[in-house]
Amino acid sequence: GDTNRFMYSATDERTFEAAMYLYNYDFDMQALYERMYMKHVKDLKVNAFILNHYIEDEGVAYYVLKDEDLKHLNISRERGSDFVNLLSSVDEYKVWLAITENTKDHNWRVSMRSRHIPVNEIANKYRGGGHAFASGATLLSLDELSLLLNDIKERINE
C-alpha cells in the first residue's frame, strides 16, 4: 500500500520481491484491493468540499480545514489530512498541502507532498520532517502559512 501501486520512487527490487511473495501466497487480490481503495459516501462529500474550497498559489495547491469544517464533515483532524493527494494529479501543482486545525494542541498540522520538489527541509523549518517528497509540519498559527508558502514557492523557483 505504501508504494501506491509501485508509483513512488522508494519502490525498489525488495518491493517487487515482497509483491512476488504475496502473489504466490493464496489470497484474494481483488478483495484486498477493494478493502484498500473502496470509498464511502462520506469521502465523496469531503472530496467535494476540498475541491470547492482549495486554493492555488504559484504552483502550490492547498486546502485548510478549520475545526468547524472538520465537525461539519464529521471527520477527525487526522482524517482531514488523508485527502492531501486529492490535488496530486494536476500538472501545474508542484507541491500540495493539507492544513488541518488541531484544537487539542492549539496549532495547525500540515501534510506536504510533491512529485519532484524536496519538501522535507522546509518541513524541518516548521517543526516537522519526513521524506523528501512527503513530509509534515506544524504551524503555531495560520499567520505562519504565508511564510511557509513563500518558502515553498522559493524552492519551486530554484
Image (cartoon, helix red, strand yellow):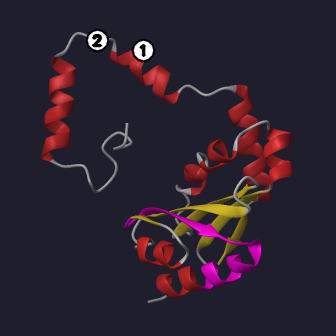
Mark number for residue 27?
2
Mark number for residue 50?
none
Which amino acid type is marked by label 1? Ala
Circle 1 — which element?
A: helix
Question: Do the residues under discs 1 and 2 have CB atoms within 8 angstroms?
Answer: yes
Q: Which residues fall within the magenta stretch?
A: 131-150
Q: Is residue 24 above or below residue 143?
A: above
**Residue at 15% over, 25% down:** 21
Front residue of 133 and 144: 144
Callout 1 crowding tier (Cα within 10 Å): few <14, some 14–19, many ≥20 = few
**Residue at 65% over, 84% down:** 147
Q: Is residue 26 above or below residue 58?
A: above
Q: Position of residue 106 (x, y in %)?
A: 74, 62
Front residue of 103 and 6: 103
- Can residue 7 be seen here? The reply is yes
Q: Position of residue 72 (x, y in %)?
A: 86, 41
Q: Which residue is tagged 1? A: 31
Q: Is residue 55 left or right of residue 153?
A: right
Q: Is residue 76 above or below residue 84?
A: above
Was residue 78 drawn as part of the magenta stretch in this picture?
no
Among the 4 quarters of the image, the one containing residue 110: bottom right
Callout 2 crowding tier (Cα within 10 Å): few <14, some 14–19, many ≥20 = few
Q: Is residue 54 left or right of residue 4?
A: right
**Residue at 52% over, 64% down:** 91
Where is the N terminus found, in terms of image quarters?
top left
